[in-house]
């Protein structure tokens, strides 16, 4: 079985489990919407300046809810000790990692499909009006977050303080992606259009490449013991 | 690594958990066709030995040699040849038994994963009764049968079983005996941790008794359950080799 086929098998496994339980997407969406609602009240619903905060609120909600998605997806691997059996299989370990990254990315993108209209409505942020140039920022920003997150979640899966460690380790590392995603989102919703996309997307893509290549390389090494 | 495993050796294998010595300087050799039954009181180091042989645990000192080469879990060809049943079922609770077996058949790159999954299920349960239900709703005994099917799915050269008969009824224990006998007769090896002298008597070719992390006895297998009980008692009374 090829590398990509293995990643696909892992992704399908995660999707099948999620379709049966719906626990990751539901909890992630609920948590993210709650963060957005709190922010909306903090900034003043519909106030003139609220739109300026929308980009930050969007990515803060994704980052916080992403921790939940990462924890839940690796909880499934920890439950019944099945992660050990996955690592003992002859499948390329980097392909297991890639499959997890694809799954978390998909779960977070589903959450963002709900988040974007909610933020658009509450913050009058013109996210939907600019969805064309915004979509690549959402996709690449989410891939970067998931690539770093899946590596750290796998590293901390067997530690007692995993939930605490995941946030503490992940946020500093992933902050460049989040900062560029916020900048790009803000520029796009300010009417920058494709020019804004062209300005900010390469920065996000560079960090995506670093996290993905680093994750694919490091995952096998870190999982050896 | 190519071909079947022809020997597994441990050299002064030691595992410490902080100041606690779980396993101390254990030398062991496993050859094709060996079924080594490992017995010992709780905390003797039996599960630690399996963890080290499965390469999921790294020794504090000493090493595991497979085909006379230091074994590392980073070698996928080696991982393909080792099967482990641990205390946990190691299956996905939200997938059905059959989905779990197909998943692992695919990860082991087995041809016709659906058929292999059905064959494995049939070996441990009539009409594969755990196949169409999520693992989360299975009873302990059913989960253990599913876990056994998963561990033996790829017909590993080295099968490591930690208390396979725990929680199982007489029918399932008979199936384990039959599966292990077939495994042994096919020239493959197994290390079996058990507290069941009768199961050990039915399938084992060698007896290993551990006490406080050390080998207390390593002998040819007694012929019956009473012989195992006698060996176990005398080995523990003797304190360790």
Image (tube, coloured by chain):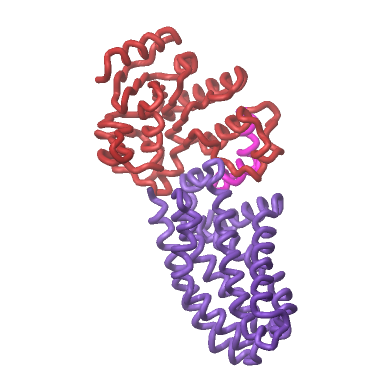
Chain colours: A purple, B red
Q: In which image quadrant can residue B47 be found?
A: top left
Residue A120: percent from the left, percent from the top? Answer: 72, 79
A178 or B50: nearer the viewer: A178
Residue B140: percent from the left, percent from the top? Answer: 61, 30
Rendered residue at 39%/44% (across/down): B2
Q: Which residues are magenta?
A: B98-124
Rendered residue at 51%/66% (across/down): A147
**Above or below — where is A199 with respect to B27?**
below
Rendered residue at 47%/76% (across/down): A176
Asked whether the viewer can see residue A51, the reply is: yes
Rendered residue at 47%/60% (across/down): A151
Rendered-image quadrant of the C terminus of chain B: top left
Residue B67: percent from the left, percent from the top? Answer: 32, 38
Q: In which image quadrant can residue B41 be found?
A: top left
**Above or below — where is A206 with respect to B26?**
below
B115 or A16: nearer the viewer: A16
| A194 within the magenta span | no
**Above or below — where is A132 with respect to B149?**
below
Residue A51: percent from the left, percent from the top? Answer: 66, 84
Decide if residue A143 is on the left or right side of residue A156. Answer: right
Asked whether the viewer can see residue B113, the reply is: no
């Amino acid at each position: 079985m090829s590398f990509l086929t293995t990643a696909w098998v892992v992704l399908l496994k995660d999707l099948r489990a999620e379709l049966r339980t719906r626990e990751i997407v539901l909890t992630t969406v609920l948590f993210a919407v709650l963060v957005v609602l709190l922010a909306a009240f903090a900034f003043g619903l519909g106030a003139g300046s609220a739109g300026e905060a929308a980009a930050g609120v969007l990515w803060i909600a994704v980052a916080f809810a992403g921790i939940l998605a990462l924890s839940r997806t690796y909880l499934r691997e920890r439950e019944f000790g099945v992660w050990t059996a996955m690592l003992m299989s002859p499948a390329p370990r980097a392909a297991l990692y890639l499959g997890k990254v694809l799954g978390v990315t998909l779960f977070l993108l589903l959450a963002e499909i709900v988040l974007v209209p909610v933020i658009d409505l509450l913050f009058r942020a013109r996210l939907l009006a600019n969805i064309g140039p915004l979509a690549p920022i959402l996709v690449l920003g989410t891939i970067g977050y998931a690539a770093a997150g899946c590596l750290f979640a796998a590293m901390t899966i067997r530690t007692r303080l995993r939930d605490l460690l995941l946030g503490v380790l992940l946020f500093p590392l992933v902050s460049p992606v989040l900062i560029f995603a916020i900048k790009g989102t803000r520029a796009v919703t300010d009417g920058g259009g494709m020019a804004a996309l062209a300005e900010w997307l390469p920065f996000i893509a560079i960090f995506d490449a670093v996290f993905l290549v680093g994750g694919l390389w490091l995952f096998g090494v870190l999982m050896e013991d | 690594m190519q071909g079947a495993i022809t020997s597994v050796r441990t050299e002064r294998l030691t595992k410490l958990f902080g100041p606690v010595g779980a396993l101390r300087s254990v030398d062991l050799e496993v050859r094709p066709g060996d079924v080594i039954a490992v017995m010992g009181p709780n905390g003797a180091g039996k599960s630690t030995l399996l963890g080290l042989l499965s390469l999921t645990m790294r020794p504090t000192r000493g090493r595991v040699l497979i085909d006379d080469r230091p074994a590392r879990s980073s070698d996928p060809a080696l991982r393909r040849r080792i099967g482990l049943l641990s205390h946990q079922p190691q299956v996905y609770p939200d997938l059905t038994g059959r989905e779990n077996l197909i998943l692992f058949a695919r990860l082991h790159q087995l041809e016709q994963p659906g058929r292999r999954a059905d064959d494995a299920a049939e070996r441990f349960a009539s009409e594969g009764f755990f196949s169409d239900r999520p693992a989360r709703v299975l009873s302990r005994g059913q989960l253990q049968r599913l876990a056994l099917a998963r561990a033996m799915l790829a017909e590993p050269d080295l099968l490591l079983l930690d208390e396979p008969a725990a929680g199982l009824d007489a029918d399932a224990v008979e199936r384990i005996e039959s599966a292990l006998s077939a495994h042994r007769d096919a020239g493959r090896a197994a290390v079996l941790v058990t507290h069941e002298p009768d199961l050990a008597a039915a399938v084992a070719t060698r007896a290993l008794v551990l006490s406080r992390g050390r080998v207390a006895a390593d002998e040819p297998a007694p012929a019956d359950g009473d012989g195992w009980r006698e060996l176990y008692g005398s080995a523990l009374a003797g304190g360790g080799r």
